[in-house]
Amino acid sequence: MAQSQRSSSQGDRIYRVGVGLLLCSMLALAACSGGGGTSSGGGSSSNGGAPTATAKAPAPTATIALQQITVAYCTHLLPLATANQIIPSSTPATTITQGNPNNALSGACNY
């Protein structure tokens, strides 16, 4: 009886290792095959040696409008009472301040 239980658990281990190796090889194959059909050297492909068009870099897109960091915005994101519940401290926060008052686009909310 003990012999059959031992071989069963050993079979489970072999199965798990096999499944793990299969998953790793599938991930490696997926990572390697993500290239597409273009070649990077010489400007030609496997279509008989005819030159292909050179890919251009994408044009710059419009910048995303950044939210100004203000005390009102910080209060909207995380109210003071909620911050005191989430952030453990021996002294609870009493105010919210803007991290960089000279530049409202590059700041942080300080509690």
Image (cartoon, rainbow, N blue to C red):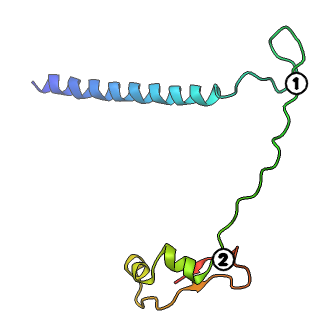
Q: Nearer the viewer, residue 50 or 12?
A: 50
Q: Nearer the viewer, residue 94 or 29?
A: 94
* 102 shown above or below 51: below
The residue at 46%/91% (across/down) is 94
Q: Earlier in the sequence, mark 1 or mark 2?
A: 1
The residue at 87%/20% (across/down) is 52
Task: Assign a secondary structure to mark 1.
Answer: loop
Q: Quadrant of the N terminus?
A: top left
Judge left or right: residue 81 versus residue 110: left
Q: Position of residue 18 (x, y in %)?
A: 40, 24
The residue at 90%/23% (across/down) is 42
Q: Which residue carries the number 2 mark?
A: 107
Q: Which label is found at residue 42?
A: none
Q: Which label is found at residue 53?
A: 1
Q: Nearer the viewer, residue 78 or 16?
A: 78
Task: Assign a secondary structure to mark 2.
Answer: loop
Q: Position of residue 26 (x, y in %)?
A: 51, 26
Q: Distance of mark 1 from mark 2, alpha carbons?
A: 44 Å
Judge left or right: residue 67 versus residue 40: left
Q: Quadrant of residue 53?
A: top right
